[in-house]
Amino acid sequence: MTNCSARPSSTGPRLDGWLITVYYTAVESYHVDPAESVRGCSRLECERGDSPLGEYPKGFVDAVQAEGTGRITSGPNAGRYLNWSHDLGYWLDDAPRDSRGQRLEPFVSAAADPGVLAAGTNFTIAECGTLDSGEKPPDEVCERIRSAHWTVRDEFTPGLGGPQHIDIYIGEEQGPDFTASPWYLSLKNAVIALR
């Protein structure tokens, strides 16, 4: 077992008091509720399109709107991604994308408000802090996010960020009810180390 309060060496300043949340890619096959039609852009370079993009489980569509991206597992678009942005709406794509149109990378991509941490800022998570309950996060989760080298490549939907708040991208959800898993968490009073 790893001690989540152990401090990795860093070359940059350590900043404490951070809220760290996670975002992920939804996976259609883990959502089994009734389908709803989605309209948007059938390609990346489009805004607020009105083309039919398919029918998908409501929980999947809701997760895509909350997280920004989801992998389609059925129908003619299987293997593609349904992406969403507050300013573009829905679109089909060949990759999960960040706000700049680049591919999201699990355990690398992070989001922050531009006035908090600029795009391109590199950091590690030196201390995981605590869960909302005040308890320490599971060792496996803390160890994995602490071992990653994060880069701010994304930014929050307006109104969702704030001072000392980072959102880290952890890849695809790993099963049904992912938001009830130990990987879907908020960490309070975490410490980051700039690199």
Image (cartoon, rainbow, N blue to C red):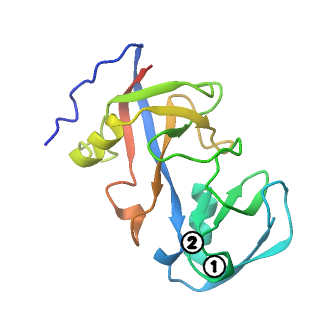
Query: Can you say whether 8 is above or below 100 in the image?
Result: above
Disc 1 target residue: 56
Callout count: 2
Q: Is residue 131 left or right of residue 25?
A: left
The extreme bottom residue here reads 34
Nearer to me, 169 or 112: 169
Residue 26 appearing in the image: yes
Query: Can you say whether 170 is above or below 59 in the image?
Result: above
Q: Is residue 98 left or right of residue 167?
A: right
Q: Amino acid at mark 1?
A: Tyr
- Callout 2 environment at 10 Å: few (<14), some (14 to 19), or many (20+)? many
Q: CA distance from mark 1 to mark 2?
A: 7 Å
Say what secondary structure mark 1 lies in: strand
Snapshot quadrant of residue 149? top left
Q: Amino acid at mark 2?
A: Phe
User: CB atoms at circles 1 and 2 under 8 Å apart?
Assistant: yes
- Callout 1 environment at 10 Å: few (<14), some (14 to 19), or many (20+)? many
Say what secondary structure mark 2 lies in: helix
Q: Residue at x 50, y 83 (%)?
A: 32
Q: Tell me the tag on residue 179.
A: none
Residue 138 appearing in the image: no
Instruction: Tell me the quarter of the image containing the N terminus.
Output: top left
Disc 2 target residue: 60
Nearer to me, 23 or 9: 9
Query: Residue 156, image x and y in percent?
Result: 63, 41
Query: Can you say whether 192 is above or below 4 in the image?
Result: above
